[in-house]
Amino acid sequence: MSRADLDKDPHDVAAMFDGVARRYDLTNTVLTAGQDRHWRAVTRQALDLRPGERVLDLAAGTAVSTVSLARSGAWCVAADFSLGMLRAGADRAVPKVAADALALPFADAAFDAVTISFGLRNVADPDAALAELARVTRPGGRLVVCEFSHPVVAPFRAVYLRYLMGALPAVARRVSSNPDAYVYLAESIQAWPDQRALAERIAEAGWAKVAWRNLTGGVVALHRAFRP
């Protein structure tokens, strides 16, 4: 896959993530200058988890984020459609499920909270995925979406876009197990809706009280919502 569009073939995307799985966590840390750890911590805080709650971590990859969430005492399951990613995180002691975001293998209202980080833009139909997340969340339960977004200050945005489309693939060639995938990832970030547009789509998928918070100047946006 070389070009990013919003009609993503699930098999192609899964294969791409299988290809980057071996060094995925290291590559993310290098490419974000360690900011990925901060973003995970803020996501955990926004979920406001309590011991005994049931939590779905969708697009969990190697389950690094799931382990972090589980420290709250909540029961957390990692779900991803890339078997390669799940295998790369096999030694992480949290439940793992191979799952399609458009047809989650869970009952209605099964979770107190659901979250997806840096995965929604890779789903073939993000709106259907948001609705499916609503289906498996109990009334009053919460959603947190952590995703790359659009920097809000124009000069910084220009610098960021130069890094995204130029330096990021170059760095990936040095550290990633599948550097070509990062060309697609950079393009998918650039094509993704801005903060307000994503908030509107979350609301249209059945979520209420949608709000967002910019992280790192809007490089990442954290959207939070509740199941009516």
Image (spheres, rainbow, N blue to C red):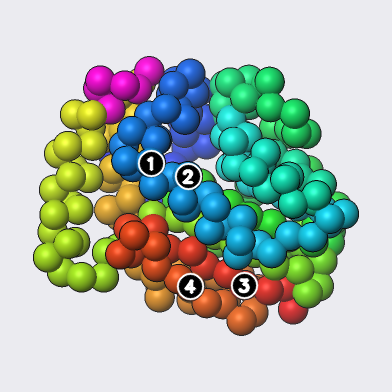
- Between the C-alphas of marks 4 and 2, the distance is 19 Å
Compared with 47, 169 (above or below) is above
Main SS type for the magenta part? helix
> Going by the image, does 33 lie left or right of 171?
right
For marks 2 and 3 on the same chain, the one whose residue lies earlier in the sequence: 2
- Between the C-alphas of marks 4 and 1, the distance is 22 Å
- Between the C-alphas of marks 2 and 1, the distance is 6 Å
Residue 96 in percent (x, y) is at: 73, 32
Please say whether residue 71 is one of the residues in the magenta stretch. Answer: no
The amino acid type found where label 4 is placed reads: Trp
- Label 1 CA crowd tier, 10 Å (few <14, some 14–19, many 20+): few
The amino acid type found where label 2 is placed reads: Arg
Asked if the residue at tag 1 contacts the one at tag 2, i.e. Cβ–Cβ closer than 8 Å, the answer is yes
- Between the C-alphas of marks 1 and 3, the distance is 27 Å
User: Which secondary structure lies at badge 3?
Assistant: strand
User: Which secondary structure lies at badge 1?
Assistant: loop
Q: Residue 37 has which mark?
A: 2
Q: Residue 225 has which mark?
A: 3
User: Which secondary structure lies at badge 2?
Assistant: helix
Q: Which residues are magenta?
A: 172-177
Residue 82 in percent (x, y) is at: 58, 29
User: Which secondary structure lies at badge 4?
Assistant: strand
